[in-house]
Image (spheres, grey):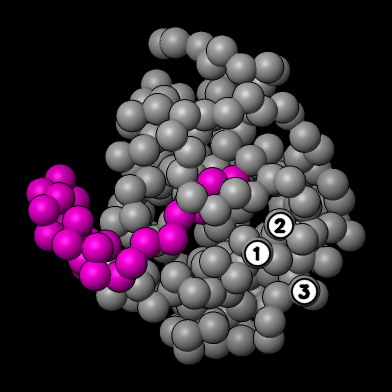
Amino acid sequence: MGCYQGVGKVIVVIEGISASGKSTWCNAHGADHTIPETGPVQNVPCEQSDPQGAAAYWAGRNVLRWQTALAMEQRTGLALCDTDPLKLHYTWCLWQIGEVTEQQWQLSVQAVRATIEGRKIGFADAYFVKTIDPDLARAQARVDMTRRRQKLDLHVRLQPALLKWYEVLDKVLPDRVQFGFPDELPTMHELNRYPGLAVFDDLIAALPA
């Protein structure tokens, strides 16, 4: 397994909606360093009948991905996360388009806040977030025979909210977010990954209701 040739050890998030090219970019620029998205899962608490259990479950899954990223970084110097381990943005985006309730959003915030407080999960050193034209995303999905993208239309609806989330994150934690995927990984440095609850709370407070 190769080692990243940059300065220090870093965790990088590659983000965008389904069919935006996240996995393709990761495979091209650091396949041996990639932390893939959460695959199929079983025995997930029902978000309708047990919203608190569902929120706790997904917060725990996010912690597992973060811990996997930390282990990869220690071994190779670089962890490329195919989507953000701190995936609270997904619930917020769903709430913005009316696919989950405000209660589900607030329960998710509480569950993730507890993991932030316990330093079980943190913020990455860099985020590269891609915008893609919906028609292009659909075209790319049609020719990709390796994956079934049953929720592509949902993801297309989520894109404006996803971009807003990272615009807000860029204001709360400046100089970490770049929009678009770079041609090559730039030189990066490890930043403060555990800036504290105040930063997390500022992020949540700054999001549009």
Q: Which mark is residue 13?
A: none
Q: Compute the Cα span from label 1 to label 3.
A: 10 Å
Marked residue nearer the N-terminal end (3 or 2): 2
Please name which of the two marks, 1 or 3, marks the residue nearer to the observer. 1
Residue occupying the point 76% across, 40% down:
193
* Residue assigned mark 1: 167
Does label 1 or label 3 sit earlier along the sequence? 1
Classify residue 66 by image quadrant.
top right
Residue at the spot 54% in from the left edge and 82% down from the top edge: 95
Disc 1 crowd rating (10 Å Cα; few below 14, some 14-19, many 20+) is some
Judging depth in this view, the residue of 166 and 95 nearest the camera is: 166
Element on which disc 2 rests: helix
Disc 3 to disc 2, C-alpha distance = 11 Å
Region rendered in magenta: 127-151
User: How busy is the neighbourhood of tag 3: few (under 14 within 10 Å), some, or many (20 plus)?
Assistant: some
Which residue carries the number 3 mark? Answer: 206
Residue 39 seen anywhere in this rendered image of the structure: yes
Task: Between label 3 and label 2, give the one nearer the viewer.
Answer: 2
Pointer 2: what residue?
A: 170
**Element type where label 1 sits in the image:** helix
Q: Is residue 78 above or below residue 54?
A: above
Residue 208 lies left or right of residue 149; in this view the side is right
Compared with 46, 70 (above or below) is: above
Visible in this render: residue 51?
Answer: no
